Amino acid sequence: MSDKIAKKVNIENRRASFEYFFLETFSAGMMLTGTEIKSIRQGKVNLQDAYCLFQGAELFIRNMHISPYTEGTHYNHEPLRDRKLLLTKRELRRLTDKLKDQGLTIIPVRLFTSDRGLAKLEIALAKGKKLYDKRDSIKERDIKRETDRIGY
């Protein structure tokens, strides 16, 4: 059983860097239940469609899928429930001020465990890329791949 549970977890939202420009990043804690943290340590998390939103003065993450824990009983968690993010008041105020700008959003970039074993979520204040920006990033990625292949 212990071989399935990882000490360090590092789950990235790879699609986010393709869809958005990151302006600023924050590290936030999360309010989780017991079966959720066990599923996270097994690596059964999907950040693909997740996004953050304010409800009142609190920040929540929505559409982050944490699979039900396999050993859980009827106390198992709901996979897509909203989870509260824990940030300082200064960080929350800064995010609300920045969100008033047109076209900015808050998206999860990476889910990891800290040295103390706590689940942390790296979120980014982001601006969506246009189609031509995505083409540029594809072109840069292909050029880098070719130069690595040649050996420069």
Image: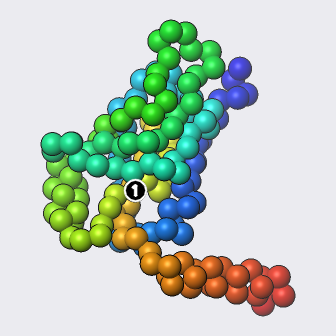
- Percent of width and height locating residue 16: 50, 62
Q: The disc labelled 1 sits on which kind of residue?
A: Ile
Residue 114, percent from left and from top: 47, 43
Q: Which part of the image, by quadrant, shows the C terminus?
A: bottom right
For label 1, count other residues whose C-alpha is less than 10 Å away and answer few (under 14), some (14-19) or many (20+): many
Residue 112 shows in this picture:
yes
- Name the foreground residue: 114 vs 18: 18
| Residue plotted at (62% across, 84% down) | 140
Q: Which of the image's four quarters has the N terminus?
A: top right
Instruction: Give the residue furthest to the front.
Output: 131
Q: Residue at x 22, y 63 (%)?
A: 99
- Outermost residue, top side: 74
Left or right of 102, for residue 51: right
Residue bearing mark 1? 107
Is 66 rendered above or below residue 112?
A: above
Report the side of 77 relative to 102 (left or right): right
58 displayed left or right of 66: left
Give the answer, above or below, for where 132 lies relative to 19. below
Considering only vertical position in the picture, is 6 above or below 99?
Answer: above
Q: Coloring scheme of the render?
A: rainbow
Question: Which secondary structure, mark 1?
Answer: strand
